[in-house]
Image (cartoon, rainbow, N blue to C red):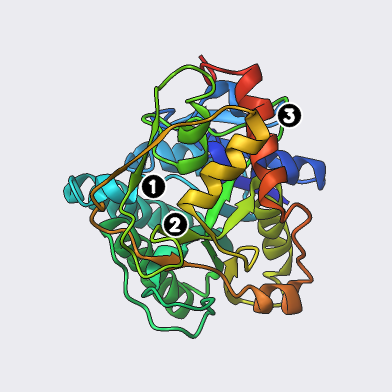
């Protein structure tokens, strides 16, 4: 298939693009490089620099050849920042997605795979499944939910086949090529690894008074390779399953303190940590029940161990201490 990957120069999009190529698909990466990196785009992918808010540029790109599917990773992802600058997130994540979906329909692309988030759910103290109550705790989660609602209507009106994949915490790297390098960095594992790299003195823990065993937030970390493999499976299943909504996670939760302790073991560095007040929009617990995608698509995480996930990230960050710079 010919696949149009919006946001394919980013952390997740670039690894998905790599796996699509390995599976024999043709890939066009469409990215404005505001958050992504030209160096992350895999060899063999065609690159078009453009913004999902630019209707004319999208029409040019999607009209250049016949595409079988669009994959959408072009979003702002920092939940904390979304609570400080909601307009920025609504414009990029919602208006940008609406512009992309409209272009998808104009060019009669029949399949769509969407990078959604576990942030659409209300938090609870046990693993979340796809039937659990919706209740975003951040503007970021709300924007992803709004795009899922758009997809439902595009299916009803235009027959668009789609998969909405609700990520838990993507982590790890695919050394030597691709790792996590956000601008600015907001994810816990790369922030923690900046301490042994000498780029910061300590790591901050945002709240230690949550209703969890050690008082810090609990998250489900999924290796980027496993996350990407689910996208390829979902894409290839769209002919048989016109609408899919799946959680993608390991089903195991680790607290912020546990992540820091594991990073200490991986790096051999003490990694000082300081507790600061909670951030708005951070639910106490987000852990996946991914039984549905395992049963229906046969997906199985290959790197579920937190130590292995952090070790892969550490290998990449030691080789790229300044990211892609």
The front one of 67 and 126 is: 126
Of pointers 1 and 3, the one earlier in the residue sequence? 3
Dot 2: what SS?
helix
Please tell me how crowded label 3 is: few (under 14), some (14-19), or many (20+) other residues with Cα within 10 Å.
Answer: few
Of pointers 2 and 3, the one earlier in the residue sequence? 3
Q: How far across and down, in percent of the image, does residue 214 sit?
A: 44, 61
Q: How far across and down, in percent of the image, does residue 154 sit?
A: 43, 71
Looking at the image, residue 78 sits to the left or right of residue 299; the answer is: left
Q: How far across and down, in percent of the image, does residue 202 sit?
A: 40, 29
Alpha carbon separation for disc pair 1 and 3: 27 Å
Dot 3: what SS?
loop
The front one of 30 and 74 is: 74
Of pointers 2 and 1, the one earlier in the residue sequence? 1
Residue shown at 69%/36% (left/top)? 311
The front one of 61 and 230 is: 230
Check disc 2 and report the residue beneath it.
106
The front one of 25 and 231 is: 231
Between circles 2 and 1, the one closer to the viewer is: 1
Please tell me how crowded label 1 is: few (under 14), some (14-19), or many (20+) other residues with Cα within 10 Å.
Answer: some
How many labels sit on residues?
3
Q: How far across and down, in percent of the image, does residue 176 sit?
A: 73, 25
Residue shown at 61%/76% (left/top)? 242
Check disc 3 and report the residue beneath it.
44
Check disc 1 and report the residue beneath it.
77
Check if mark 1's residue and mark 3's residue have beta carbons within 8 Å: no
Looking at the image, residue 142 sits to the left or right of residue 77; the answer is: left
Looking at the image, residue 174 lies above or below residue 243: above
Dot 1: what SS?
loop
Between circles 1 and 3, the one closer to the viewer is: 1
Q: Quadrant of residue 269 in the image?
A: top right
Residue shown at 17%/49% (left/top)? 87
């Amino acid at each position: 298939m010919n696949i149009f990957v919006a946001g394919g120069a980013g952390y997740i999009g670039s690894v998905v693009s790599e796996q699509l190529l390995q599976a024999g698909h043709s890939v066009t990466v469409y990215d404005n490089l505001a958050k992504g990196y030209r160096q992350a785009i895999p060899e063999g992918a065609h690159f078009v620099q453009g913004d999902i808010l630019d209707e004319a540029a999208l029409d040019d790109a999607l009209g250049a050849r016949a595409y079988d599917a669009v994959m959408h990773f072009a979003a702002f992802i920092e939940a904390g920042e979304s609570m400080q600058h909601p307009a920025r997130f609504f414009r990029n994540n919602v208006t940008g997605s609406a512009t992309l979906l409209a272009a998808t329909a104009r060019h009669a692309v029949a399949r769509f795979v969407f990078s959604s988030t576990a942030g659409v759910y209300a938090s609870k103290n046990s693993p979340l499944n796809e039937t659990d109550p919706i209740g975003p705790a951040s503007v970021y989660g709300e924007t992803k939910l709004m795009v899922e609602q758009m997809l439902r209507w595009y299916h009803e009106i235009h027959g668009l086949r789609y998969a909405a994949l609700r990520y838990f915490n993507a982590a790890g790297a695919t050394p030597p090529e691709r790792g996590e390098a956000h601008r600015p960095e907001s994810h816990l594992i790369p922030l923690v690894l900046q301490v042994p790299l000498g780029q910061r003195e300590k790591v901050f823990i945002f709240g230690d008074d949550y209703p969890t065993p050690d008082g810090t937030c609990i998250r489900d970390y999924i290796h980027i390779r496993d996350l990407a493999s689910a996208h390829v499976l979902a894409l290839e299943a769209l002919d048989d399953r016109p609408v899919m909504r799946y959680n993608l996670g390991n089903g195991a939760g680790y607290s912020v303190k546990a992540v820091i302790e594991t990073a200490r073991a991986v790096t051999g560095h003490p990694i000082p940590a300081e507790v600061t007040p909670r951030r708005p929009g951070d639910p106490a617990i987000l852990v996946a029940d991914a039984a549905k995608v395992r049963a229906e698509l046969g997906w199985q995480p290959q790197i579920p161990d937190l130590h292995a996930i952090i070790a892969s990230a550490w290998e990449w960050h030691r080789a790229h201490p300044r990211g892609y710079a």
